[in-house]
Amino acid sequence: MTLQLVDLVNGRKYVLADGVEIKIGRSPSNDIVVPTRSEEGLTEEQKIEGKILGGYVSAKHATILAHGGTARLLDLDSTNGTYLISEDGRNKFRTYIENGLLPGSVIGLGNPQNSKSYNLRLEEVPSQ
């Protein structure tokens, strides 16, 4: 099973190759670069509502590694944290999740208490 991360703001999809660590953060050197308010492609509503503010995500925020249908998440000592967002809307702070993320898991980077987090959902890539 191949996994992907789906950006819940702009719908971008990032396929996770099994065994390859993916870096996430604001810095352009990351594999997934978190957009800022000024990035093209965001609607004015998204900018105004502050649904995605790169300032709440660290330059080098977290890494994720897919392996065998699950994924490992590691927060890289980010300023505002990394969260696993449960279906009931509660946020659980995590610095490290070893092979515990399954398809459907939602990861929040930043500050979910004031809706300033960047959210990604882990999904299975549909078979063709």
Image: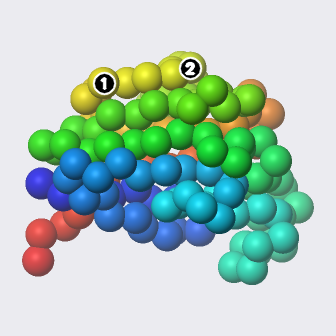
On the image, which quarter does residue 49 sit in? bottom right
Task: Please give the label number shown on residue 70.
Answer: none
Residue at position x 42%, y 67% from top? 13
Q: Give SS at disc 1.
A: strand
The reply, left or right, for residue 84 in relation to residue 49 is left
- Decide which of 109, 85 is in the foreground and name it: 109
Q: Position of residue 89 (x, y in %)?
A: 55, 29
Q: Position of residue 8 (x, y in %)?
A: 54, 57
Q: Position of residue 3 (x, y in %)?
A: 25, 55
Q: Position of residue 111 (x, y in %)?
A: 73, 33
Residue at position x 19%, y 43% from top? 67
On the image, which quarter does residue 79 sit in? top right
Residue at position x 53%, y 30% from top? 75
Q: Give SS at disc 2.
A: strand
The reply, left or right, for residue 95 in relation to residue 115 is left
- Calculate the distance from the C-alpha at mark 1 to the C-alpha at mark 2: 14 Å
**Residue 111 visible in this rendered orientation of the protein:** yes
Residue position for label 2: 93
Labels 1 and 2 touching (C-beta < 8 A): no
Task: Please give the label number shown on residue 98.
Answer: 1
- Hey, what amino acid is under mark 2? Phe
Q: Residue furthest right?
A: 48
Q: Residue furthest front?
A: 29
Residue at position x 41%, y 52% from top? 22
